[in-house]
Image (cartoon, rainbow, N blue to C red):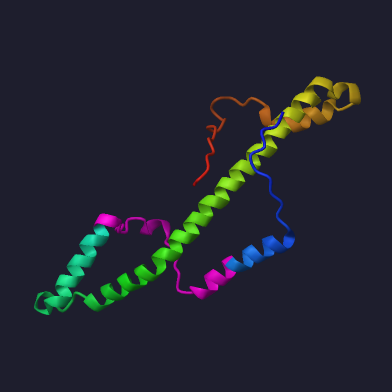
Amino acid sequence: MSKNRVSMTITPEQAQSARAGVTQTRAALPQLIELEADESGLLYMGPQSEAFVRATLRVLRENPQLVPPGLNLAEAEADLAAWDALRPIADQVLALSNQLQDNLTALGSDAMDVALDGYAQIKLMGDRYGLGDLRKEIGARWRRRSRASAPAPELVTGGG
């Protein structure tokens, strides 16, 4: 019946250790910031922009006569050095986050498969065992709503 894709048991000790690792990472990088929604207009430095930034900062460092007094080249170079140090950490954390999301998706899908098969059995035979009210209660997830109030369905996919 079920199409199990993942089999996993997380002990309380494993969960605590993983959470401690996240806490340790945050403690190791106390200067991390969280952007506010109104700061979403910041410039994004992708791969092509990175090459542009590195080349421009190099040319300015090699030609200090081009640097006006208000342009803080040292701060930009310090930002780039911090970016270089943080980037591999962010890549590892993102890969882990994607893997965690993939596992959540697979585990949730497996549990949902079994629940749907089980609910079909409850619908089929539940009244014989006095489970009619319970069937209605757990079946509330499937109640139809008016189109105006029904949220759009979500398609959940893995992040890896």
Q: Position of residue 38 (x, y in %)?
A: 38, 57
Vertical position of residue 155 compared to residue 144: above or below:
below
> Which residue occupies the extreme left position in the image?
65
* The quarter of the displayed image where residue 27 is located: bottom right
Point 59% across, 43% down: residue: 105
The answer to whether residue 12 is seen in the rendering is yes
Please state if 32 lies on the left or on the right of 6 as rendered.
Answer: left
Point 63% across, 39% down: residue: 5
* The quarter of the displayed image where residue 123 is located: top right
Point 41% across, 68% down: residue: 86
Between 1 and 86, the one lying in front of the other is: 1
Q: Is residue 84 magenta?
A: no
Q: Position of residue 112 (x, y in %)?
A: 68, 35
Q: Is residue 37 magenta?
A: yes
Check the picture and name the quadrant holding the N terminus: top right
Vertical position of residue 160 compared to residue 141: above or below:
below
The mark total stands at: 0
> Which residue occupies the extreme right position in the image?
129
Point 44% across, 62% down: residue: 90
Q: Position of residue 107 (x, y in %)?
A: 65, 43
Please state if 36 lies on the left or on the right of 96 as rendered.
Answer: left
* The quarter of the displayed image where residue 47 is located: bottom left
Which portion, as a residue range, is magenta? 22-48
The answer to whether residue 68 is seen in the rendering is no
